[in-house]
Amino acid sequence: MFATDLALATPLLILAGAALLLLVVGAYLPRPERLVGLGAMAALAASAVAAVTGPQGQAFSGALTADAASVFAQVVICLGSLVAIPLGQAWFERRGIRHFEFPVLILLAALGMGMMAGAGDLLSLYIGVELQSLALYVLAALQRDDAKASEAGLKYFVLGALSSGLLLYGASLVYGFSGAIGFDEIAAAVKGEAGTGVLFGLIFMVCGLAFKVSAAPFHMWTPDVYEGAPTPVVAFFAGAPKLAAMLLFARVLAEAFPLAADQWRQVLILIALASVAVGAFAGLAQTNLKRLWAYSSIANVGYAVLGLAAGTAQGVQAMLVFMALYTVAVIGFFACLAALSRNGRPLETLDDMAGLFQQRPWLSLALTVFALSGLGLPPFAGFWGKYYVFMAAVNAGDPILLWSAVAALVGSVIAAFYYLRLVKVMWFDPAPGETDRPPVEAGAIAVGAAAFTFPVVLGLMPLIDHYAKAAAAALGLG
Amino acid sequence: MALQAIAFYLLAAVTIAAGFGVVSARNPVHSVLFLILAFFSAAGLFVLMGAEFLAMLLVVVYVGAVAVLFLFVVMMLDVDFAALRQGFARSMPLGAAVAGILAFEMVAVSAVVANRGAAGASEGPLAATPDAPNAEAIGRVLYTDYVYFFQAAGLVLLVAMIGAIVLTLRHKPGVKRQVIADQVARTPATGMRVVSAKPGEGIQE
């Protein structure tokens, strides 16, 4: 019995074991950064392989679920974390910061995300969220001599604690009124009409999770944290953690409250539209690219939530496809920012990007691809994500959802302004000066992600579609 | 039974009196000591209810760690508590109103719990089993049914520890530290040298 539990938890056990081992290795070796980084990358790759090849089922009396959805998420999480390690280590090393704890914290964050992706009850949900967030708070503040990074870490921590409080309060209400913590048991206890108490708890939990994915109106921390935190760390936590939190979102709603769908759909539509609106309008006024992409991520999470709001398996599939494609694009974008500097000063504002095409054609091409993908122009990855979301919203057969999709489309047209402005500045404005040689690893990751966003994604789309469909079917929405 | 009743009233009275002492003592250190007394009496109340594990936790965690931390903070920070207490009479009505609302809420919640209103659908908490003390009962499930949560919570604490170290530990080059190994390894040959000083010039390094 216990052996099967452990077999189901293998992807997580690999991460936990590697984190503990590398911590000891790092503490005793004189210059352990490179070795610990390689070890952490190997562990992440092993965890992804173990998730794909491992058995599926429920472990630890329902606390941990290994199904197609958790496998899908685990693979994306591991890839996103794996890329962040060389990107971050080289970036910190250039600034004279040597922390072997960086890869270890990434491993522990990935472990927390894995727990979130496979959470089967309220306890594992909360512990997973906490493990992931706590590691991310530390990563955000890792550059501790930088006032902005410290501010970002502190802000992230305080608001994250607040959102955990909301989540926990909601969970306690749900537990109090349904008498169960397992998602299946909650669904059985709630039956049909959800009472006011359970609904209250559900709404609080939705608010807490919306905080974690930075959906409006719980988005205020995002721009400040993205701006202040070290760029490669932003590349890490703008991607994979949001996918994990979105899957957790879907899991809670689909497995614990399938019959209260009419109630939670209204809330999700509201959150989705607010996010798209905030992302589109507030982004117009931004000149700092990290802040701009923070608003872009708020808008993108809005589209993902819209997919979820459809309340169908197709909607969950759309959300997973959207988040997986977005994760790659956002990592690539921040890798570009990590690669670019002029006289040692990182290029972070829109004006800094002027004339980039003449000096760094590859990187500016990559940035163009990410901007056009964020805009949702047809052959790029961002278009496919939005296509799935809008199809799901239209096929759900609900007029409100149909109009919401139209509104979200309008939002995406408004947001097109800032994406296109970035492209225009890079290609047509005169350059203020020479840029430094981009570091190899950041440049490679940026160009690789851009190549995935277009054209590799076209070839992979059937595959992603297939696995996302299987994952969505595992959550059991009609 | 009578003995239990006497113990209950005694402990309850001491708890309330100590609670009053916490807010009325002039010296903040006395307040913390009263707080510790309140924790101890509350632990006694838990034992009376058959929850000896909670009693143990209260003493170990709250008295052993939290109250001692309070004591350190109170002693180390130079807070003028007399000044803080200036507006006591002015804010008294508001405080009394909040206390009244709190008391009403507690009575209401107790009444609901007594009628099993909120959690009516479930079977409720397990009854205390006299043959297995509850510390043992918790120990039985902690590493079996709840091993996943227990270990994961341990990892959360590990992250907190790593974070605290990464964000605060600094290796400054000029700081002199005691290295006991170096001290032990010192011999007369390394620790002493003979210098010949010329008369009237002293030692020049």
Image (spheres, grey):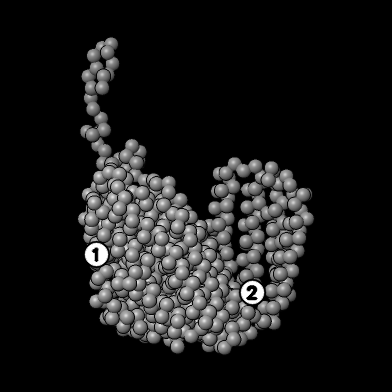
Label 2 residue SS: loop
* Residue A385 falls in image quadrant: bottom left
Q: Amino acid at mark 1?
A: Gly
Looking at the picture, tell me which residue is in the foreground, B156 or A297.
A297
Above or below, A138 against A390 in this view is: above
Q: Amino acid at mark 2?
A: Met
Residue at image x 23%, y 27%?
B193
Q: Which residue is mark 1?
A: A448
Callouts 2 and 1 in the same chain: no
Looking at the picture, tell me which residue is in the foreground, A391 or A59.
A391
> Around disc 2, counting alpha carbons within 10 Å, would you say few (fewer than 14), some (14 to 19), or many (20 or more)?
few
Residue at image x 55%, y 53%?
B68
Residue A399 spot, x, y in % from top left: 52, 82
Q: Which residue is mark 2?
A: B49
Q: Is residue B14 left or right of residue A180?
A: right
Q: Is residue A10 left or right of residue A148?
A: left
Residue at image x 24%, y 62%?
A447
Is any atom of residue A424 visible in this view?
Answer: yes
Looking at the picture, tell me which residue is in the foreground, A40 or B46.
A40
Residue A291 spot, x, y in % from top left: 42, 56
